[in-house]
Image (cartoon, rainbow, N blue to C red):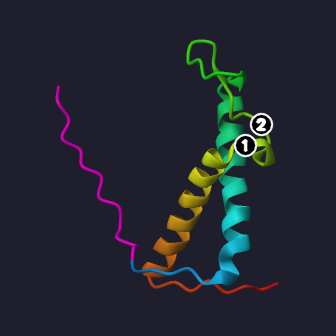
Amino acid sequence: MKHSYKPAPADTSHIELPEELNTLVEDMAKNVHEVWSAGRIREGWTYGPVRDDTKKTHPCLVPYEELPESEKDYDRATSQETLKFILKSGFSIIADR
């Protein structure tokens, strides 16, 4: 069966994140990784130097700080796009620190 799914994410290209959110982006990226890691571990995955779906090993099952920059960038992009979507949807982000 051929699937014709075409992803259509919300266009957030015109949304600029304020500089004050850079720390939040990084904190969210770390949390995204923590949530992903916790889910994998619950499913029986462990650290391994290479990804092996049969053995359920993955090289990214390490603390966020030990990830390669390319993996951190993936988590940062997820966080940035989430924040942009929140703003595009008409919500405000207010720091209460």
Q: Residue 67: which numbered mark, if any? A: 1
Amino acid on which disc 1 is placed: Leu
Q: Is residue 40 left or right of residue 90?
A: right
- Residue drawn 77% across the image and 36% down it: 62
Residue at image position (59%, 17%) is: 52
Instruction: Residue 10 in the image: state x and y as whole percent.
Output: 35, 67
Of residue 50 and residue 81, the one placed in the foreground of this image is 50
- Between circles 1 and 2, the one closer to the viewer is 1
Q: Residue at x 69, y 43 (%)?
A: 68
Q: Residue 45: image x %, image y %?
A: 68, 24
Local secondary structure at mark 1: loop
Q: Is residue 2 magenta?
A: yes
Q: Which mark is residue 62?
A: 2
CB of mark 1 within 8 Å of CB of mark 2?
Answer: yes
Quarter assignment of residue 31: bottom right
Q: Nearer the viewer, residue 53 or 41?
A: 53
- Please provide the residue range marked out in magenta: 1-13
